[in-house]
Image (tube, rainbow, N blue to C red):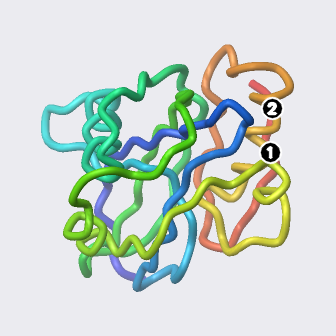
Amino acid sequence: MPKRIPRQAARVAVLDPAGAVFMFRYDNEEVGVHWAMPGGGMEPGESPLAAVEREVREETGWTDVEIGALLCLWEHDFTRKGVPVRQHERIYLARAPRREPVGELAAAHAEDKIQSWRWWTPDELSGDTEPLWPPQLPELLAGVRRDGPPWRPIDLGFVPNGGVVSVQDP
């Protein structure tokens, strides 16, 4: 088992007015194809909120997304640019109009191995899909639609690749 390097990251669940979430399809050398929300690693000295704002701008071209409540925390393993990492991730919520990414994003997408993107409706998200990061995303977003943002972030803990653990209310 390779030694994993700790990595801090932040992502955002951008929800359209109908509750669909924007996601990217990635292909990773360790875990394979999966869907995840905009976001990524924090730069030295960068706050999680600043990191997620920067990542949204770099990956979508959107500059007007207002980041809201912290939805959840989780940890997972994958390999990034040949280095095995254990990523400690914060996922925020945001509301925005349904739209396509804008600008010259091909180089950034190629570097991050982003293959495509799409908006997922709640029904599509809960159906039979390729792996989602985190796997509990359909349940987490159902809770947001039902009850609003959590009063404190839901801590999913470490989620092994291929593992799904049910969400527990704090």
* In the foreground, 6 or 44: 44
Q: Residue at x 69, y 21 (%)?
A: 150
Q: Residue furthest top?
A: 151
Image quadrant containing the N terminus: bottom left
Q: Are marks 2 and 1 in contact (CB under 8 Å)?
A: yes
Q: Is residue 44 left or right of residue 130?
A: left
Q: Quadrant of residue 16?
A: top right
| Image spot of residue 47 (x, y percent) | 26, 28
Q: Amino acid at mark 2?
A: Gly
Q: CA distance from mark 2 to mark 1?
A: 6 Å
* In the foreground, 137 or 119: 119
Q: Is residue 40 visible?
A: no
Provide the secondary structure element on which disc 2 rests. Answer: helix
Q: Which mark is residue 143?
A: 2
Q: Residue at x 26, y 81 (%)?
A: 82
Q: How dense is the environment of label 2, judged by Cα within 10 Å: few (below 14), some, or many (20 and up)?
A: some
Q: How dense is the environment of label 1, judged by Cα within 10 Å: few (below 14), some, or many (20 and up)?
A: some
Q: Which residue has dot 1 on it?
A: 139
Q: Residue at x 50, y 51 (%)?
A: 37
Seen in the picture, residue 65 relative to 151 is either above or below; the reply is: below
* In the foreground, 74 or 148: 148
| Image spot of residue 27 (x, y percent) | 45, 79
Q: Quadrant of residue 163?
A: bottom right
| Image spot of residue 108 (x, y percent) | 23, 64
Q: Amino acid at mark 1?
A: Glu
| Image spot of residue 145 (x, y percent) | 79, 29
Q: Residue at x 43, y 79 (%)?
A: 28
